[in-house]
Amino acid sequence: MKFCPKCAAPLAPKISGGRERLSCSAEGCDYVFWGNPVPVVAAILEYKTEVILVRNVGWPLEWYGLVTGYLEANETPEEAVLREVKEEMGLEGKVISLVGAYSFSRKNEVIIAYHVKGSGEILMGEELADYKLVPPAKLKPWPSGTGHALRDWLRSRELTG
Ligand SMILES: [Zn+2]
Protein backbone atom coordinates (compact mmCIF):
# COMPACT_ATOMS: atom_id res chain seq x y z
CA MET A 1 0.00 0.00 0.00
CA LYS A 2 1.56 3.29 -1.10
CA PHE A 3 -1.46 5.45 -1.89
CA CYS A 4 -4.67 6.29 -0.11
CA PRO A 5 -7.65 4.26 -1.44
CA LYS A 6 -9.98 7.18 -0.59
CA CYS A 7 -8.19 10.13 -2.23
CA ALA A 8 -5.06 8.67 -3.92
CA ALA A 9 -2.62 10.89 -1.97
CA PRO A 10 0.61 9.19 -0.84
CA LEU A 11 0.57 7.32 2.47
CA ALA A 12 3.09 8.31 5.13
CA PRO A 13 3.91 7.03 8.62
CA LYS A 14 1.91 8.78 11.36
CA ILE A 15 1.07 7.86 14.95
CA SER A 16 -2.48 6.48 15.27
CA GLY A 17 -3.88 4.39 18.09
CA GLY A 18 -0.58 4.40 19.95
CA ARG A 19 1.78 3.30 17.21
CA GLU A 20 3.17 4.31 13.87
CA ARG A 21 0.97 3.37 10.91
CA LEU A 22 0.75 4.30 7.26
CA SER A 23 -1.78 7.12 7.01
CA CYS A 24 -3.01 9.46 4.32
CA SER A 25 -0.84 12.57 3.94
CA ALA A 26 -3.66 14.73 2.50
CA GLU A 27 -5.13 17.50 4.60
CA GLY A 28 -8.65 16.58 5.76
CA CYS A 29 -8.47 12.85 4.84
CA ASP A 30 -8.62 10.47 7.80
CA TYR A 31 -7.58 7.21 6.09
CA VAL A 32 -5.31 4.95 8.16
CA PHE A 33 -3.96 1.65 6.86
CA TRP A 34 -4.49 -0.47 9.97
CA GLY A 35 -3.19 -3.72 8.48
CA ASN A 36 -5.32 -5.85 10.78
CA PRO A 37 -4.62 -9.59 10.51
CA VAL A 38 -7.00 -11.69 8.43
CA PRO A 39 -8.62 -14.68 10.16
CA VAL A 40 -8.04 -18.12 8.68
CA VAL A 41 -9.61 -21.39 9.81
CA ALA A 42 -7.69 -24.66 9.94
CA ALA A 43 -8.81 -28.25 10.51
CA ILE A 44 -6.87 -31.03 12.14
CA LEU A 45 -8.99 -33.43 10.15
CA GLU A 46 -9.29 -36.88 11.65
CA TYR A 47 -10.55 -39.54 9.26
CA LYS A 48 -11.02 -43.06 10.64
CA THR A 49 -7.78 -43.58 12.63
CA GLU A 50 -5.62 -41.12 10.72
CA VAL A 51 -5.19 -37.38 10.11
CA ILE A 52 -5.49 -35.89 6.63
CA LEU A 53 -2.70 -33.57 5.50
CA VAL A 54 -3.07 -31.72 2.21
CA ARG A 55 -0.81 -30.18 -0.40
CA ASN A 56 -2.21 -27.10 -2.12
CA VAL A 57 -1.73 -26.55 -5.85
CA GLY A 58 1.58 -24.73 -6.33
CA TRP A 59 3.23 -25.93 -3.11
CA PRO A 60 6.57 -27.79 -3.21
CA LEU A 61 6.14 -31.57 -3.46
CA GLU A 62 7.21 -32.24 0.12
CA TRP A 63 4.87 -29.66 1.73
CA TYR A 64 1.74 -30.96 3.41
CA GLY A 65 -0.39 -29.02 5.84
CA LEU A 66 -3.80 -28.76 7.45
CA VAL A 67 -6.99 -28.04 5.56
CA THR A 68 -7.28 -24.24 5.74
CA GLY A 69 -9.34 -21.43 4.28
CA TYR A 70 -10.73 -17.94 4.66
CA LEU A 71 -14.10 -17.09 6.13
CA GLU A 72 -16.93 -16.00 3.88
CA ALA A 73 -18.99 -12.95 4.85
CA ASN A 74 -21.42 -13.69 7.74
CA GLU A 75 -19.95 -17.13 8.36
CA THR A 76 -18.87 -18.34 11.80
CA PRO A 77 -15.40 -19.91 12.07
CA GLU A 78 -17.02 -23.30 12.74
CA GLU A 79 -19.17 -23.02 9.63
CA ALA A 80 -16.12 -21.96 7.61
CA VAL A 81 -13.96 -24.87 8.73
CA LEU A 82 -16.71 -27.40 7.95
CA ARG A 83 -17.27 -25.81 4.52
CA GLU A 84 -13.53 -26.06 3.77
CA VAL A 85 -13.46 -29.72 4.84
CA LYS A 86 -16.35 -30.37 2.44
CA GLU A 87 -14.83 -28.35 -0.43
CA GLU A 88 -11.27 -29.66 -0.13
CA MET A 89 -11.88 -33.30 0.88
CA GLY A 90 -15.55 -33.98 0.10
CA LEU A 91 -16.13 -35.06 3.70
CA GLU A 92 -18.88 -34.27 6.17
CA GLY A 93 -17.14 -32.71 9.15
CA LYS A 94 -18.03 -32.52 12.82
CA VAL A 95 -16.23 -30.04 15.07
CA ILE A 96 -14.87 -31.89 18.11
CA SER A 97 -13.05 -28.99 19.76
CA LEU A 98 -11.37 -25.64 19.31
CA VAL A 99 -7.62 -26.32 19.46
CA GLY A 100 -6.61 -22.67 19.69
CA ALA A 101 -5.90 -19.39 17.93
CA TYR A 102 -2.41 -18.67 16.60
CA SER A 103 -0.81 -15.65 15.01
CA PHE A 104 0.89 -16.21 11.69
CA SER A 105 2.78 -12.95 11.34
CA ARG A 106 4.53 -13.78 8.07
CA LYS A 107 1.19 -13.64 6.26
CA ASN A 108 -0.49 -11.24 8.73
CA GLU A 109 -3.10 -13.87 9.55
CA VAL A 110 -4.68 -15.29 12.69
CA ILE A 111 -5.26 -19.03 12.49
CA ILE A 112 -8.29 -20.44 14.30
CA ALA A 113 -7.70 -24.19 14.51
CA TYR A 114 -10.26 -26.91 15.15
CA HIS A 115 -10.15 -30.63 15.66
CA VAL A 116 -12.66 -31.97 13.13
CA LYS A 117 -13.80 -35.54 12.51
CA GLY A 118 -14.54 -36.29 8.88
CA SER A 119 -16.85 -38.95 7.50
CA GLY A 120 -17.92 -40.13 4.07
CA GLU A 121 -15.86 -40.78 0.97
CA ILE A 122 -12.81 -38.66 0.14
CA LEU A 123 -13.24 -36.53 -2.98
CA MET A 124 -10.33 -34.12 -3.34
CA GLY A 125 -11.19 -30.55 -4.41
CA GLU A 126 -9.58 -28.43 -7.11
CA GLU A 127 -7.52 -26.30 -4.70
CA LEU A 128 -5.46 -29.36 -3.79
CA ALA A 129 -2.69 -31.19 -5.61
CA ASP A 130 -2.51 -34.14 -3.21
CA TYR A 131 -3.35 -35.39 0.27
CA LYS A 132 -2.08 -38.07 2.59
CA LEU A 133 -3.35 -39.98 5.59
CA VAL A 134 -0.97 -40.04 8.55
CA PRO A 135 -1.43 -41.95 11.83
CA PRO A 136 -1.30 -39.44 14.74
CA ALA A 137 1.81 -41.15 16.19
CA LYS A 138 3.69 -40.33 12.98
CA LEU A 139 2.71 -36.66 12.74
CA LYS A 140 5.62 -34.25 13.06
CA PRO A 141 4.42 -30.67 13.65
CA TRP A 142 6.21 -28.05 11.56
CA PRO A 143 7.57 -25.01 13.41
CA SER A 144 5.21 -22.28 12.18
CA GLY A 145 1.58 -21.34 11.59
CA THR A 146 -0.72 -24.34 11.68
CA GLY A 147 2.14 -26.54 12.97
CA HIS A 148 1.66 -24.98 16.41
CA ALA A 149 -1.98 -26.09 16.43
CA LEU A 150 -0.98 -29.61 15.46
CA ARG A 151 1.65 -29.65 18.24
CA ASP A 152 -0.91 -28.55 20.85
CA TRP A 153 -3.46 -31.10 19.65
CA LEU A 154 -0.91 -33.94 19.84
CA ARG A 155 0.06 -32.82 23.37
CA SER A 156 -3.55 -32.79 24.53
CA ARG A 157 -4.05 -36.30 23.11
CA GLU A 158 -1.06 -37.55 25.09
CA LEU A 159 -2.45 -36.00 28.28
CA THR A 160 -5.92 -37.48 27.88
CA GLY A 161 -4.74 -40.82 26.49
ZN1 LIG B 1 -6.63 10.10 1.67
Image (spheres, grey):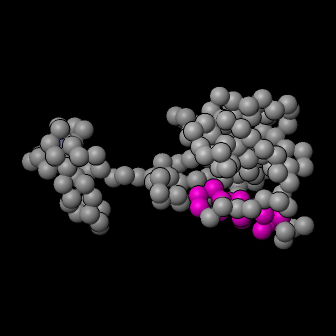
Residue 12 drawn at (x, y percent): 18, 54
Would you say 21 lies left or right of 74 here? left
Quarter containing the C terminus? bottom right
Q: What residue is shown at x 70% (from left), y 62% (from top)?
A: 141
Magenta span: predominant SS is helix
Q: Is residue 107 above or below residue 47?
A: below
Q: Is residue 122 found inside the magenta-colored segment of the image?
A: no
Ligand 1 quadrant in view:
top left
Q: As rendered, which of 54 and 47 lies closer to the eye?
A: 54
Q: Nearer the viewer, residue 56 or 46?
A: 56
In the rendered structure, the answer to whether residue 77 lies left or right of residue 46 reads left
Nearer to me, 41 or 27: 41
Asked whether residue 65 is in view, the answer is no
- The image quarter containing residue 146 is bottom right
Q: Is residue 61 visible?
A: yes
Question: Measured from the top left, where is residue 44 in percent x and y?
Answer: 74, 51
Q: Is residue 148 magenta?
A: yes
At 59% across and 43% down in the image, what residue appears?
A: 59
The part of the chain drawn in magenta is 144-157
Q: Is residue 66 left or right of residue 38?
A: right
Q: Position of residue 90 (x, y in %)?
A: 76, 30
Picture quadrant where residue 75 is located:
top right
Between 129 and 33, the one nearer to me in the picture = 129
Question: Residue most toward the left?
Answer: 27
Residue 33 at what x, y percent from top left? Answer: 29, 50
Query: Image point 27% across, 58% down: which residue?
Result: 21
Q: Residue at x 11, y 46 (%)?
A: 26
On the rendered structure, is 148 left or right of 29? right
